[in-house]
Amino acid sequence: MPGRGALIVLEGCDRVGKTTQASKLLEKLQHRGIPTQLLKFPDRSTSTGQIINSYLTRKMDLPDKTVHLLFSANRWESEPQMKKLLNSGVTLIVDRYSHSGVAFSAAKNEMSIHWCYQPEIGLPKPDLVLFLTLNETAISKRSGFGDERYENSEFLKKVASNFQRLKDDAWKIIDADKDIETLNKELLLHVEKVIESVKDTHLSYFDP
Ligand code: Z5A
C-alpha cells in the first residue's frame, strides 16, 4: 500500500513566483513517477470562484466579510477531493491556500487574524509551506501589477506583515531572488524530504 500524499503549499506576496514554481514542481514530481496534482486558490472555475473573480476584477462589489467567507468556501468546495487524493497517495501542490485567505482579509480594517482564521478550522493542514520572499528591487523587475483589487503596495505591506504572524513549524522561508531553475531545485529538495517523511502519518487539520 502506498502511504498518503503530502500537502505542499506555496505562499508569499505578489509576483514572487508561486505559480511558476508550482507548475515546475508538478512537472518534476510527475517525471519522477510521484503521483502529484496541482491546485490553485482561488479556484476561479467553481461557482464561488466565479463570484470571487468578478470581485477581484472589480465587476462586483461585496462586503469584506462576505468576500472573506467566499474565499474560504472556495477552499471547502475542494476539501472532499483534496482529502480523497491525499489519502490515496497523491501529493498536492497548492498555489496559495488558507494563509493567503487570512493575511489578505486581515489587512483590511474590519477583521482580525483570529476572526479570519475561524472558517479555515477543519481544512487539511499543510505538511509544508514554502513561503517565497523577494526584496523590493527584485519585485520591481517582475511584470507589473494588473488592475485587480489588492494590487497596491501599501495594502501588500500589511499583507506581508500578517504573513509573518502566521508562520509555524511547517514553514520554510525561501529567498526567491534566484533564477527559476535554481530556485526550483531548492524547493524540490524540501518537497521530496516531506513527501518521504509524511507518507506513513495521518493527515492533520487546522485546529481551533
Ligand atoms: N486572495 C485572497 O484575498 N484570499 C484568499 O483566500 C486567496 C487569495 C487564496 C488573486 O490571487 C488574489 O486573491 C491575490 C490574493 C487574493 N491578490 N493579490 N494581489 P492569485 O493567486 O490569482 O494572484 P496572482 O495575481 O495570479 O499571483 P501573483 O501572486 O501575482 O504571482 P505569483 O504566482 O507569485 O508569480 P508568477 O505568476 O509565478 O510570476 C510573476 C512574474 O514573474 C511572471 O512574469 C514570471 O514569469 C516572473 N518570474 C517568476 N519567477 C521568476 C524568477 N525566478 N526570476 C525572474 N522572473 C520570474
Image: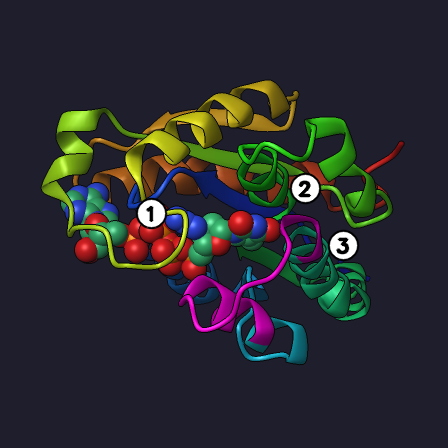
Q: CA distance from mark 3 to mark 1?
A: 37 Å
Q: Nearer the viewer, mark 3 or mark 1?
A: 1
What's the magenta region? 51-66
Q: Position of residue 57 (x, y in %)?
A: 40, 67
Of 35 and 118, which appears nearest the observer?
118
Q: Position of residue 69 (x, y in %)?
A: 73, 55
Q: Position of residue 134 (x, y in %)?
A: 27, 29
Mark 3 CB lies closer than 8 A to ligand 1: no
Identify which residue is drawn at 62% across, 25% down: 166
Query: Is 192 inside the magenta-drawn segment?
Result: no
Query: Is 54 inside the magenta-drawn segment?
Result: yes
Residue underneath mark 2: 126
Of 154 and 136, which appears nearest the observer?
154
Residue underneath mark 3: 4
- Would you say residue 25 is visible in this rendering? no
Mark 1 CB lies closer than 8 A to ligand 1: yes
Task: Identify the mark at residue 151; answer none if there is no mark.
Answer: 1
> Of the residues under marks 3 and 1, which one precedes in the sequence?
3
> Of the residues under marks 2 and 3, which one precedes in the sequence?
3
Q: Position of residue 199 (x, y in %)?
A: 74, 46
